[in-house]
Image (cartoon, rainbow, N blue to C red):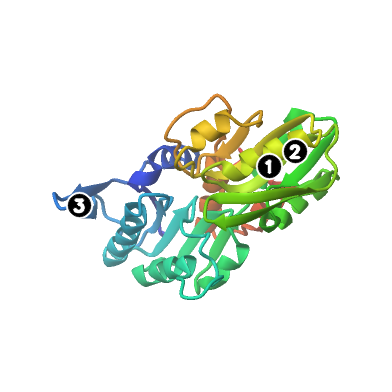
Amino acid sequence: MGPSVKIFSGTGSHQLAAKIITRFGVPQGKVNIQKFSDGEFQPVFLESIRGDYVFLIQSTCAPTDNLMELLLMIDGAKRASAYKIIAVMPYFGYSRQDRKDKPRVAIGSKLVASLLETAGADRVITMDLHAPQIQAFFDIPVDHLDSSAIFIPYIESLKLENLTFAAPDVGSTPRVREIASYFNAEMVICDKHRKRANEIASMVLIGDVEGKDIILIDDIIDTGGTLAKAAGLLKDKGATSVRALCTHAVLSGNAYQTIENSELEEVVVCDTIPLKHSGRKLKVISVADLFAIAIRNAYENKSITSLFIHSQMREKVGKI
């Protein structure tokens, strides 16, 4: 008899984990996060995991306790003699710190990768890293899922006649170009310049959007400032409509208000991060099916390559 599957959820991803576990078809693993008066906490597995495949679902969004909790769960699973420990991180926090772009700064994503390996993770399953090269920071397998498998069917359902895609900054160009080429659509770029983090000094448009229905594509929406400014610029240049599709809804500060007051018709996000509030313009699409397939394929030692191919993914979602 081979190793069985046990799936556990961290406190930062309870809602998404419940959907993934239901879709996968196993009972949710029992774990208790003991909390102490000084703020410390200690995960305790309430069932045997000896010799099992252990999947730990936790997005490492704010607060940083979510990252520490995941590390402690990995360490606990290792000390409980789990056969394999897979960190399922729908949102990989600190991914924006992926390079040394100025003197005397940390590379946060590399540090997180080292911490996960040191804690005892055997594999990581995540989605839409801010920079794909972050995978090279790991010496263990990383399965990097692509949200376009979720977004492409939604875009098709909109049936927009004059579809054009927009990159909200130069860094997101490769991601947007891939989806634009899938639809054989045009692409424009909103080139922004920052004076400091989360504050845009200026933005210019590269391309023509007159009479076009624009879809902005990005991996993270944080304060919402970039997308709001881009939407305003696109409308000023003659766009008929502007909407945005973003994987990870960080939505910090006044983001909810910024979105509501913007020219954006809607902002479609995934549930990799739980929303703090609802919003008239916010629409959530679940990634539960995608991660359930990835977990099953990892457990059964099947290829996960098909999860990176849009046409195949549309056929596979919902068929585990």
Task: From the image, tell me which residue sits under label 3.
Answer: 39
Q: Nearer the viewer, mark 2 or mark 3?
A: 2
Count of marks overlaid on the render: 3
Q: Earlier in the sequence, mark 2 or mark 3?
A: 3
Q: For label 3, count other residues whose C-alpha is less than 10 Å away and answer few (under 14), some (14-19) or many (20+).
A: few
The residue that appears at 70% across and 56% down in the rendered structure is: 170
Distance (Cα) linking label 2 and label 3: 46 Å
Q: Residues within 10 Å of mark 2 (few under 14, many from 20)?
A: many
Residue that protrudes farthest toward the top in the picture:
280
Instruction: Give the mark toward the camera: 3 or 1.
Output: 1
Q: Which residue is mark 2?
A: 234
Mark number displayed over residue 75: none
Asked if the residue at tag 2 contacts the one at tag 1, i.e. Cβ–Cβ closer than 8 Å, the answer is yes
Residue 2 visible somewhere in the drawing: no
User: Quick one: label 3 or label 1, which is nearer the N terminus?
Assistant: 3
Q: Is residue 207 left or right of residue 282?
A: right
SS assignment at label 3 = loop
Residue displayed at 77% across by 43% down? 165
Circles 3, 1 touching at the beta carbon (< 8 Å): no
**Which residue has dot 1 on it?**
230
Q: Which quadrant would residue 53 be assigned to in this image? A: bottom left
> Could you tell me residue 80's position as x and y percent?
27, 63
The amino acid marked with disc number 3 is: Gly
**Nearer to the camera, 308 or 1:** 308
Quadrant of the image occupied by residue 268 = top right
Residue visible at 76% across and 52% down in the picture: 178
